[in-house]
Image (tube, coloured by chain):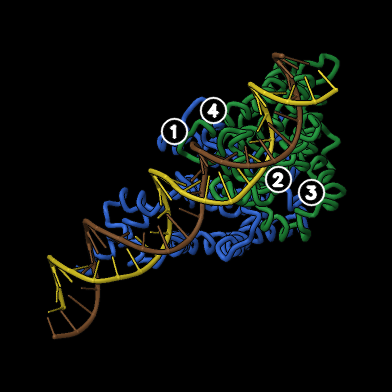
Chain colours: A green, B blue, C yellow, D brown
Amino acid sequence: MDKEKIDKKEHILDVAEKVFSDNGFDGASTRLISGEAGVNMAMLNYYFGSKEGLFLAIFERKISSFQTLLQNIGNDESMTSWDKLALCIDKYVDRIIVNNCFQKLINREVSMTKRTELSDKITEILMVNVLEIKKILDEGIKNGSFFKDIDIQMVIATIFGTKNYVINTPNISSQMLGHDVRDEKFLEEKLKPRIKTYMKRLLKAYLMNDNDNKK
Amino acid sequence: MDKEKIDKKEHILDVAEKVFSDNGFDGASTRLISGEAGVNMAMLNYYFGSKEGLFLAIFERKISSFQTLLQNIGNDESMTSWDKLALCIDKYVDRIIVNNCFQKLINREVSMTKRTELSDKITEILMVNVLEIKKILDEGIKNGSFFKDIDIQMVIATIFGTKNYVINTPNISSQMLGHDVRDEKFLEEKLKPRIKTYMKRLLKAYLMNDNDNKK
DNA sequence: CAAAATTAATCAAACGATTGATTGATATAA
DNA sequence: TTATATCAATCAATCGTTTGATTAATTTTG
C-alpha cells in the first residue's frame, strides 16, 4: 500500500530525528538509527541516498511551514511593529519547544567553525528567519514604534540566544529552574508561557517607551 | 629540558583546544590533533592517557580563575547591585571573547541530552557561575535596586544565551553583523564593546527604573 | 483473465576507510 | 644502567556505504 510506504519513511525520519538529537550527527551511526527504527541498514541509503541525505530530509521536513508563518506575520499590514514582533516571539517559542531536541541538533551543527555543505545549508535556511525579524525591527524604527538607537542585530541574538540557552543546556537550566526542562508537561504548561511573558517584557523595555513596564 | 617538556604538553593542549573547537569532539581525530601539533600520535596517549583525558586536561586548565573573579565581585560590599551586575557582564564578555573557540566546545558537550561524566563535570562548574549571578540579582531585588517581579532565571538565560548565540553560531552572526566574528581585531575593537553596551542597556531597561534609557 | 516481465522493496554480508589505542623498537638523558 | 621520550607500524573496532540475491508489488502482454 502506498500509505504504508510513506508511513515507513516518516517513521524512519521520526526515529532518526530522535537518535540524531540524542547522539549528535557523528554519534548517531546508521546502525543505531536503523536498529531503533527496526529497518534494515541499507534502507537508509535506499531512501535517502546517504546519512547526510537523511539528515537533510529531517531538516527540510521541519523548516518550510515556520518560514511562511513568519513571512505572513511580517507582511500583515494591519498589525503594529510591536504586535508583529510579539507574535513572532509567541510562534517561535511554540515552535522550538515542540521540536526542542531537534533544535539542539541544529545548533550543534551550526556551531562548527569549519564550514561544510551541511552547515552552509542550515545557515542559509536559518538566515531567512533572522532577516524576517530584522525586517520587522527595521520597520519599527522607521515608523517610530521603536527607539532609533537600538542594536538590531544584538536584539536578534537575544531572541534566539535566550531560548537556545534554556533548551540547549538542559542540565544547567533544569537545575536553575528547579524542574526538568525535558518534562513535556512542565514545558508546555509552565515554561512556555513564562518564556513568552519574559521575552516580551524584556524587549518592550528595551525597544520602546512603555510605562506599563515600570512597576 | 624540563621546561621544554612542559612547553610541549602546553603546545599540545593549545592545538588540541583549537582542533576540538573547530571540529567537535568526534570530528577531531587523534591523527588530526597530533598532525596539527606536529607530534607523534602516540604522544597524546602517552601524556594524557586517552582522547577523553586530553579533553579533560584542556577543560581543567581553564576553569579556576574566572570563578574566583566572579565571587570577588559578588562579595564586594562597596558596590551597588547594578554595578556588580554590570561588572560581571564586562568581565564575562572579556572572558568568553578571548576563549571563544573553547566556549563553543563546552556548549556543544553541555547540549548533549545523554549525560556523561564529562557533561556532568562541565555542568557542575558552570552552575557556580550561574549561582553567582543569581545571588547578585536576588540581592538587588531585596535592596530595592531591581523590580520585584523580574524573572531572575530568564535574565540569566539572556545573559549567557545572547553571548553564546553570537559566538556559537559564527556563520549566522557573521552574516548578520556584516563582519567575520572570528576576526580577532573585529572581535576586540568592535564586537566586544558593542555587546557590553547592549547587554547593560537591555538589562537596565528590564531590571530597573532608569530614565536615561528612554531616548 | 492469467502468465510473464518489470520494477520496487528488503535483506544479510561484505567493502574499504578511518577510528582510538597499543606495541615493541629506538633514541635520549640522567 | 635506568628511566623517559619518541617513533613507525599495527591492532581490533566501528564507520558509512555498496553489493548481489531474494521477495513483493506492479505493469505489460498474450
Q: Earlier in the sequence, mark 4 or mark 3?
A: 3
Mark 2 surroundings within 10 Å by alpha-carbon count, few (fewer than 14), some (14 through 19), many (20 or more): some
Q: Which mark is residue A15?
A: 2
Numbered disc in front, either 1 or 2: 2
Q: Which residue is mark 1?
A: B186
Q: Are marks 4 and 1 in contact (CB under 8 Å)?
A: no
Identify the element where label 3 is drawn.
loop
Q: Residue at x 57, y 27 (%)?
A: B176
- Disc 3/disc 1 C-alpha distance (Å): 34 Å
The type of residue carrying mark 2 is Val
Which one is in front, B42 or C3?
Answer: C3
Q: Residue at x 75, y 28 (%)?
A: A66
The type of residue carrying mark 3 is Ile
Q: Image height check: is A77 above or below A189?
A: above
Q: Earlier in the sequence, mark 4 or mark 1?
A: 4
Which chain hosts label 4? B
Q: Are marks 4 and 2 in contact (CB under 8 Å)?
A: no
Q: Which residue is mark 4?
A: B177
**Quadrant containing the N terminus of chain A in the rendered view:** top right
Identify the element where label 2 is drawn.
helix
Numbered disc in front, either 4 or 2: 2
Percent position of residue B38, x then y = 27, 51
Which one is in front, A79 or B108?
Answer: B108
Q: Which mark is residue B150?
A: 3
- Disc 1/disc 2 C-alpha distance (Å): 42 Å
Which chain hosts label 2? A
Numbered disc in front, either 4 or 3: 4
- Disc 4/disc 3 C-alpha distance (Å): 30 Å
Say whether residue B34 is left or right of residue B161: left
Percent position of residue D10, x then y = 30, 60
Identify the element where label 4 is drawn.
helix
